[in-house]
Each structure stands twice: as structure tokens, then as C-alpha cells.
Amino acid sequence: MTNKPLILGGRDDGFGERMRAILNAMYVAKKFDLEFGFVWRDIDGENFLDGKVKSPLKALPYMHELFSDKFISRYFRADLTYSYLTPILNTHHKKSITNLLKLPYERDWGWYMTQGDLDTWFNDVEHLEYRKCIASCFKSIEFSDAVNAIFKKVDLKIKDLGDFVALHIRSGETVYDELYINMWWHCRYKISPYPINIAVVLEELKRGNNVVLFSDDFTLLESVKKYLVNSNPNFKSRIFITTELKESGLRDFEDMIFDVYLMSKAERIYCSWTTGFARLACYIGNNKIISLPEYYSVSKTYELMIKFIDIDEINPHQAAFSYFFLYILAKELNLPFDMKLSYLKRSFELHENYNTKIFLLDLLLEYHQFEEVDLMIEQMNLEEKKNCLTLLLNYNLNPTLPFHIFKHYFVGASYKNISRFAFEIFLAFNDEGHGVNAYYPGFRSLILDLFYSVFNGPKCLQIAQKPNIDVYKRHSLAYTLGYAMIENSKSLWGYIRMPYVLSYLKEQHIKETDLLRKEKRYYEFYNEAHTLSVELGKALMRAHKIWYKGGYLRLIFVDIPIIKKEFLKGKK
């Protein structure tokens, strides 16, 4: 048995990132004579706008559609699974790539390979050698007959097209999928706004170059080309969109293969900062890639966004995204509040969604517009509140939110609806097992400190003693929690500090119950008293079991009012 590590291409996201990881794994394996392998999970997705906007997952080929049977038989590892986490990015950053040969490996069998550029992560990977070898690795892959047929179609098209510059206008799910629209990190670094691309196209056309526009949004390509040709009819013979260059009837994955292989033939590629698709094309063709966030300064980007944002026949989703992007730039440039607010409101008018609303609330909170925010939250229905909180506290839907997005809700007990959001944020971070603590490991202590300082946390332990009634009520968790809810709901201050009280009481109840069991003084009770305390406590425990489905929101806005109403009716 060899002690050499296996180098595995094991990403599970879009085509670009999967293939970049595979090519990097092939490069390392070839460089050090190691074993190469890959994993590939076949998944499906849905397109948008009746197929006019392509989803990265819908276009993703099945393994047997992409690779030959021989390649799969030799390198596919059915015994292993995919992984998004590649610890080499941290443990070996700016160190020698030869460390991958040393024990201990990341896994007992070897390493998952990153999709990142190895010449920037390791200090001894030479750029030209790496890029040349990566392009060679791509050529060595045995693809399926269908994929090879697409390659031949592109080679024929290039003979007619000649030299060209490529622009990749990445859109997709962050512009059209309701769960992902206007995600901050994706908007800033992954998605490419059309106004900036228009500016680049005009520069290249004025230099006399042919330009090919690539995008997963075919309607956007048509609108941008129409605008450019209308601005100067002489541009018509030198600007192309990919939908015009390929035959109809291609399957989704064939369409995507055509695009990435054609893009690889460009002299240079303009794209967003983190798009894996354009960077894969750069790997294949060993050509130059230009990141638009680095090509223009923030102030120049802002200037060009203003200049080209209002063009005819742009889909409202695209315009909404571009106005949200303007807000991000305005925030980075420290522009006045009114300007930032106008961009967010315009984005929300063009397409209402919860992500934009989160940032609208945050901006108002930042400028102490507390009454307006409190009213906005009050006017949301239960489902709207749940969706906002889901986007706030689910990293998979909104990665790398800045800390101030959470911090701004901790403004004190004077604003009950803002405080309810603060309460939900606290509950998530207070639960050490909640996913949000894995996603934002540095935030938990800051959030807890905020809660305690703003809502006078330490004093919340000074809770009233429960009346000495009977042994059932003393040892019933439902009664204990319900009684605390009643006592703390007598004031807004008590209501806000309630989550800490309840958390403390639950922990104490568990400890006391364990002690009673050891001392054989614990009793099982089957006939629960239907007191208000018990019913509220039961509702709280039910809510906790389905917290991830909005259980606490339903408790606050639905269950508690119903229980109180029924209790008062019974007393009459």
C-alpha cells in the first residue's frame, strides 16, 4: 500500500468550480506523480423566465454526459463524497505546495483539492508553468462524444469569428431566484452588473475589437446589444451575443459547454471577481482574465453605473439588482443617507424581496430611524417576519453578512418590534448548536454581550419566586416556563429579557430533575392542570421544537394571544 496521498477533485457547486478543482487535482497529481481522482454528483435545477435565464444547476451535465466511460472507470471515486471545505487554503496558505506530500494529510487518504488559483495560494507555484500545465490537463481529459462534438462546432465558428474579446455577464440565481436575490456578497463580487459591462464593451469597440457577450440571461444579452447598436449602428458588425453564434436545439449542458469553450478562445475575458465559469474558460485557453471590481476603482464604477443604469427593455430583476449594487457602492463611498436610501427603495420598487428589505431596515437602523423600522416590522405578517429572519440567520442563503446587520437591532426595549427581532437573533446565537454559530464563529460572544448590555441581562435572573402550590407544579417544566412568561410579560422590559430567563430556567429544571431522580424523589404526573402557566409553557416547548420553521414567531404572534383569549373565556 502506497503512502502517497490521493488528490481529489470534489467540489459540488456549479460547472466552473467543479472543473477547476478537478484540473487543480490533476495538476498536483501530475506534478508529484500522485494518484488523481474525482467525485461528481448528478443534480437537477430549474431555469428562470421560461428558459430564457439559465440556472447553473440546470445546465450542469450528468457525469456520463460529460466524461467518457473510460475516464469515469479510471478516475471516479464512488467510495468518496464531495466537500466544500478545503482546509489547505488555511493551513498551507503562502507556504510550499510540497507540504501536501507530508503527513498528516487532510483525510486519511489524502487531500480535497481547492478550486482556487494555486499560484496565488502557494509560494512556490510558478504562474506561467501552472497555467500552461492546467491547459494541458484539460486537453488530456477524455470527454464524451457529445462534448467533443461541441468542441468541433466551436472550432469551426472561430474560423468565421476571428479574434475577439469576451465579457461574461454573470446573473442567474442571485438576480432571479427569490431565495438568493440581492445577496450582499454575491452582488458585490460574483454577479456582474450590466452598466459596467456596457462601459467595457464601448471601450473595446472604440479600440476596433470584436466583442462577444456571454451570459446566463439571454434577455439581458439582447437588451444590451440593442442599446449598443442603437448608440452607434457601426458597432453592429463587431458585437455578438452567444445566442446568435450557436445552432438551436442544443441541450442545456451542450449550450453551456459551447459557451465556456468559445470563451476560452478569447484574447481576454472580463468578468466578476469570483465567477468560476469565466475562470474555467481562462484555465482552458490560458488567456488573460480581467476582474471588473479590480479594473475600475469604486468611484469610477459608481460613475459608470449612474451613466448606464437606465436603458430600455431591461428586465426589472436586472434593474433591481443594479440599483442594489449602487447602494453597495454608495455605502463604500460613504455617500449621504438620502442617496443610499433612494437606491434601496428603487431596487425594492422594481422587485420586492426580503433581502433588499433586510438591508433597507439596516440602513434605517444605522441612521436611527427607529420609529419607521418598528412600524415596518409591525406591518409585516407572520410569514414575512419568518422569511426575513430566515435570510438573516441562514448562512446558506446569505453568506458573509457584516456584523452590523445583526448589531443594529439591539437598540433597547423602547421599540417592541425591533426588539422582537433582536430576541430572535439572540436565541439563534445563544444556541451553541445553531448553524449560525458555525457560519459566524466570531459573532456569538458579541451578540450575547449586546443582548445583556442593552436589555440589562444580569438583572433578568432576579425573577419572582414561584408560589409554593403542589409538587406537580414545582417540577413541571411547562408550569415553570409559563409562570415566568406571565411574570415577565407584565412590562416591556421583562418581555425583552424573557429569552434569557427561559433559557436559564430550562437549564435549572434539567439539573433539578436529574437530582430528584437520583434521590428517588421524582414523580410522574399524568393529569396536568390546565392553568395559564402550564398552557403557555407547553406552547413554548412546542415552538422550540420547530424553531427552524418559525416556531417562536408563531408563538409570539399567534399562539400566545389565542391561549390568553381561551383562558379569559374559561374564567368567565
Image (tube, grey):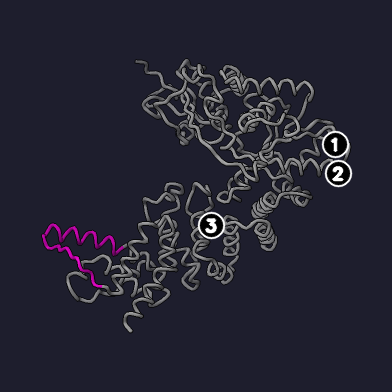
Nearer to us of marks 3 and 1 is 1
Q: Is residue 75 magenta?
A: no
Query: From the viewer's perspective, is 238 left or right of 89?
Result: right
Rendered view: 376 above or below 311: below
Verify CB contact (< 8 Å) between mark 1 and mark 2: yes
Q: Which residue is mark 2?
A: 231
| Residue at far left of view | 520
Quarter location, residue 448: bottom left
Q: Secondary structure at mark 2?
A: helix
Placement of the C terminus among the 4 image quadrants: bottom left
Rendered view: 258 above or below 382: above
State the extent of the magenta-drawn residues as a range: 504-529
Q: Earlier in the sequence, mark 3 or mark 2?
A: 2
Q: Find the distance from the CA under tag 3 to the CA under tag 2.
A: 41 Å
Quarter location, residue 292: top right
The image shows residue 2 at horizontal and vertical percentages of 37, 16
Whether residue 415 is visible here, answered yes or no, is yes
Q: Which residue is mark 1?
A: 235
Q: Find the distance from the CA under tag 1 to the CA under tag 2.
A: 9 Å
Q: Earlier in the sequence, mark 3 or mark 1?
A: 1
Residue plotted at (49% across, 46% down): 396
Q: Find the distance from the CA under tag 3 to the CA under tag 1.
A: 45 Å
Q: Which residue is mark 3?
A: 405
Depth order, front residue of 70/375: 70
